[in-house]
Image: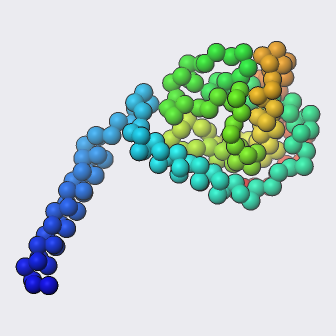
Amino acid sequence: MPPSRSLARLRNGLIVTAACLGGLWLLIYGGAYDVGADAPHYELVSWLLGIIRQRSIAVRSADIALPADLGDPQRLAQGAALYGEMCSGCHLAPGMEPSEISQGLYPRAPDFRQGTGLRPQQAFWVIKHGVKMSGMAAWGVTHSDELIWDMVAFLGKLPSFSATDYRAAIGNAAEEHEHAMHSTGRSAPGESRQ
């Protein structure tokens, strides 16, 4: 190839690279991308973030073992109290109207009255570790694995609850949540990263 063609290709490549870097600089430092929670992502960004989130959760939850007592009534009762206190404001509950926070989140928190769409191991991982830039807290920082499994157990049953069933299940959620934080009635879990 003659030197003039090689130089022309190199020059064109440098121009394209400079244009891409300039566009990236404008996007990042120029504030061109709106990160406001009231402005939806571009479709491509939303799609890409959705795939990243799904694959990240699937990979990181693949080796988590289910507890044998996931359907235990004590676990379900404890999970109901925790859900009522910690989760219903964003994820809603039977008979509950959308809350101010649930309407203001972006991305919107899933409405768990219809189910989670997650395997129990995936729900455990999400509750324990949270999801960056979504408003989903990492409850594993303040709650034991046992308490997180209680929440997972309850989530599996939530779609079958009526508003009356739900109100009965959450009982004195605030008091029960406080009690759960100090004593679960089960042995303390190890510090696993699950």
Residue 190 vs residue 103, the one in the foreground: 103
- Residue 139's x, y, as percent? 68, 41
Q: Residue at x 70, y 54 (%)?
A: 61
Q: Left or right: where does residue 98 sit relative to residue 44?
A: right
Figure quadrant of the C terminus:
bottom right
Q: Residue at x 70, y 43 (%)?
A: 118
- Residue 175's x, y, as percent? 81, 23
Q: Quadrant of residue 89?
A: top right
Q: Quadrant of residue 35?
A: top left
Using the image, determine if residue 98 lies above or below residue 150.
above
Q: Left or right: where does residue 63 sit relative to residue 100?
A: right
- Residue 57's x, y, as percent? 63, 51
Q: Residue at x 55, y 35 (%)?
A: 135
Q: Residue at x 11, y 73 (%)?
A: 8
Residue 161 vs residue 83, the one in the foreground: 161
- Residue 68's x, y, as percent? 90, 49
Q: Residue furthest left?
A: 4
